[in-house]
Image: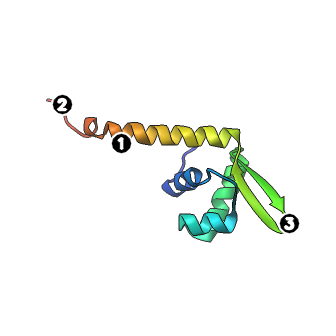
Amino acid sequence: MFVLTKNQVKLLKLLNKKMRIVDIYLESKIPYAHVLKFINKFEKMGLITIERIGNQKYISLNERGLKLRELIIEIEKYLKNNKNNYGSKKP
């Protein structure tokens, strides 16, 4: 079992295409060091593929990462649609 932070979820949702690390950093507005740390964690978890083209590294979600991304998006939609049902006290 693993727990993802808010920024890690943000990064997973952003990776819907092959991206360079610097582009991930610029689009996510997450500190560069954190982006590198998250990418290393995602690689260890088996969620991403790293491809080297020339002197650039391109990051993309593999099948497992795409499935996790889809599940996160579904959960967020579910919670958004049912937010009125949470937090209310029953008599």
Disc 2 marks a residue whose amino acid type is: Lys
Q: Which residue is mark 3?
A: 54
Q: Residue at x 40, y 36 (%)?
A: 78
- The three-letter code of the residue at mark 3 reads Gly
The C terminus - image quarter: top left
x, y percentage for residue 56? 79, 66
User: Viewer-nearest of labels 1 and 2?
Assistant: 1
At numbered mark 3, what does the secondary structure look like: helix, strand or loop? loop
Instruction: Residue 1: tell me if it is visible.
Output: no
**Residue at image location 25% in from the left, 40% down from the top:** 87
Name which of mark 3 and mark 1 comes first in the sequence: 3
**Pair 2/3: label in front:** 3
Q: Secondary structure at mark 2?
A: loop
Identified at 55% across, 39% down, the residue is 70
Query: What residue is shown at x 49% (from left), y 54% (from top)?
Result: 6
The location of residue 46, given as percent across then percent down, is 72, 44
Q: Residue furthest left?
A: 91
Determine crowd level at label 2: few under 14, some 14-19, many 20+ residues with C-alpha closer than 10 A: few
Is 64 or 43 nearer to us in this picture? 64
- State which tag comes first along the sequence, 2 or 3: 3
Residue highlighted by disc 1: 80
Dot 1 lies on which element?
helix
